[in-house]
Image (cartoon, coloured by chain):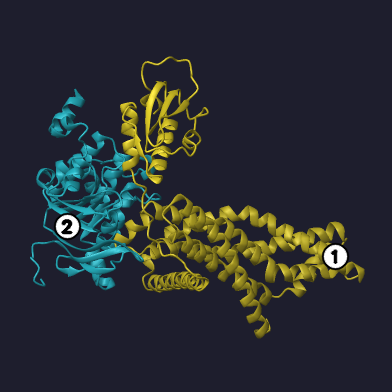
Chain colours: A yellow, B cyan
Amino acid sequence: MKDGLQSPGVSTQPQAATAKLETGPPGSECLIKIGGDWRLSGPVPSWSATLEQRAAASVRVVPEGLGKWDTSLVLFLVHGRAWCAQSKHDLHAEALPEKLQTLLKLVAETSTPGPIDKPIVRSSWDFAAALAGTWASHAKVIISFVGECTLGFVNSIRKPRRFRWRDCLIEMQQCWASSFPIVTLVSFLVGVILAFQAAIQLRQFGAAVFVADLVGLAVVREMGPMMAAVIVAGGTGAGFAAQLGNMKVDEEIDALETLGISSVDFLALPRLMAVTIMMPLLALYGNVLGILGGMFVSATMLDIPSAAYWIETQNRVGLSDVASGLTKSVFFGLAVGLAGCLRGMKCDRSAAGVGTATSSAVVTGIMLIVVVDALFAMIFNVLGI
Amino acid sequence: MNGEPPENVIQVKHLTCGYGETVVLREISFGVHPQEMLFVIGGSGCGKSTLLRCLIGLLKPLQGDVSYFGENFTAADPGQRREILKTFGVLYQNNALWSSMTLAENVSLPLEEHTSLSRKDREEIVALKLAEVGLSGSGELYPSELSGGMQKRAALARALALDPQIVFFDEPSEGLDPITSREIDRLILRVRETLGTTMVIVSHQLSSIFRLADRVIVLSRETKGIVAEGPPTELAITSADPRVRDLLNRDDDSPKRMRQPASGRLDGFSK
């Protein structure tokens, strides 16, 4: 760019850029002599400082010892032209190098693009209406997606051979493999933490053995399924969103749709099924580890023999407690899967869209888990389970 | 067929498409004749891709309708829609091969979904399709293991899997070098000659347009509609609209290159 703008045949010694003003008789023409090297990186005169409120019928710009020049000179002249247009002066720049003239003409022709017509939000009422509209359309998308999944599920019960079992098995394997180590660690530690907390209180009453009751119930009814669900939401749910989002960006989902293959049946259902099957298994595994965590603390810190701890747990924790936790975890799985698949399939067609979809899947997933948990807490309370 | 000339395989009537409040194309109508090679061209942002998305049913038109073989696609119920979808294949700009499946599985999936062929028959057809596009023996590769040109071929094989009567192409030579792009053009010509497929191609590759097109439709962003329609060579010279002439003579910096016959160019390269 710079080379193209340079005037040939000048010395390499840089000269300070100058713009000298010469005023003729009042009311006639004033002359601006431009000289030296004009560089964007160096100091250059400004038009307004040069002209200083001088009144003249016209302004003529001529080169005098003009060395190398770049966009800074063009900018100087553009300012000059704007100034002249505003104060109704004539600007004569015919004596300047031809390249400079061409550039000036180009700048004049290039009009700035007009504003893109977008609906403008005017008042806070409009803003509220727009927000409500957005929420309504979000709700519509979620409801229609859940509906499509339900229809797809009914169809695959009717024709089980059409269900993509292979994809489902692969996803189940992935889900287990990615969540297994973290569920192990987190569940064990949750058991440890609960045991410590309980021990501090219960020891005051000499009821340390009831640590087993507390840990057992808390883990089996709440923490086991909940922790497994949060871990799966962060790993597998986010994975679904990223994978499907990428497929959307690469038009792979469009390719399915134009072949008349439902992308929900083909992509979402196997994943939903996989995560719904795996979630109770992970929750059950988490339950075992949580109880082991409590047992570890009791044996090492509270001097309760493991056998006693185990018997106490067996006495207190019934099958209905385990079943209630596992029932919840089935729905947690459904929630995580739905959030992941929905966010992925409705992802924007850009790299940023995939990122947003992924984080949104995790947030939506965890939010749904808590909502589902609260609903079940109410239901179990009413039913007395 | 509703008074329309029966020879049109695709009939677009008063189609208005866009996104939400924004109208991209307004009230456009055109037809596509059997075995025709129709190019849809225009400057950036003129709605070429939007039109394509409307034609293949990925975008619901705001108004108007699209008919295939006299059957209304826009207002079709799911069953009819599925039948119509089987009559055309689409080659996407990014190829859109399913990345978790091998090439053979990619080509085989449409057959699995829409036919009751046995596994063995399907495998044979897949091998045949891959051979047609010059990819025989690559069935076990995954899309990521292929070059851009090979991916394009594989995507064409998938688009042709159900022997569609129409194939839509979205920028078939985008991102390919001139040689590969020319090979793809040749492949497209061969497919039409051997299978008699109607082709609708969205592109702005001038060389491809002059090599392949029977007819072009020029869309304009300003008028949100069709500004010209006809054989490309004719439009390039005789169009009354300077924008259309401009669009079709974009290589005015190197006029020699454009006047030279395409084959000559390639021979020169290979020597």
* Disc 1 residue type (three-letter): Ala
Image coords of residue A239 (percent x, y): 51, 55
Instruction: Give the labeled residue for mark 1.
Output: A199
- Horizontal side of A133 relative to A228 (left or right) equals left
Q: Is residue B187 visible?
A: no
Chain holding disc 1 = A
Query: Image quadrant for the C terminus of chain B?
Result: top left
Q: Nearer the viewer, residue A101 or A160?
A: A101
Closer to us: mark 2 or mark 1?
A: 2
Q: Which mark is residue B62?
A: none
Label 2, secondary structure: give it. Answer: loop
Instruction: Give the labeled residue for mark 2.
Output: B165
* Disc 2 residue type (three-letter): Gln
Query: Image quadrant for the N terminus of chain B?
Result: bottom left
Residue lying at 26% horizontally and 67% vertically, measured from the top left: B82
Residue lying at 42% horizontally and 26% vertically, measured from the top left: A34
Image coords of residue A232 (percent x, y): 58, 59
Relative height, residue B148 to residue A133 (above, below): above
Q: Neighbour class for label 2 at 10 Å: few (<14), some, many (≥20)?
A: some
Residue lying at 11% horizontally and 62% vertically, measured from the top left: B8
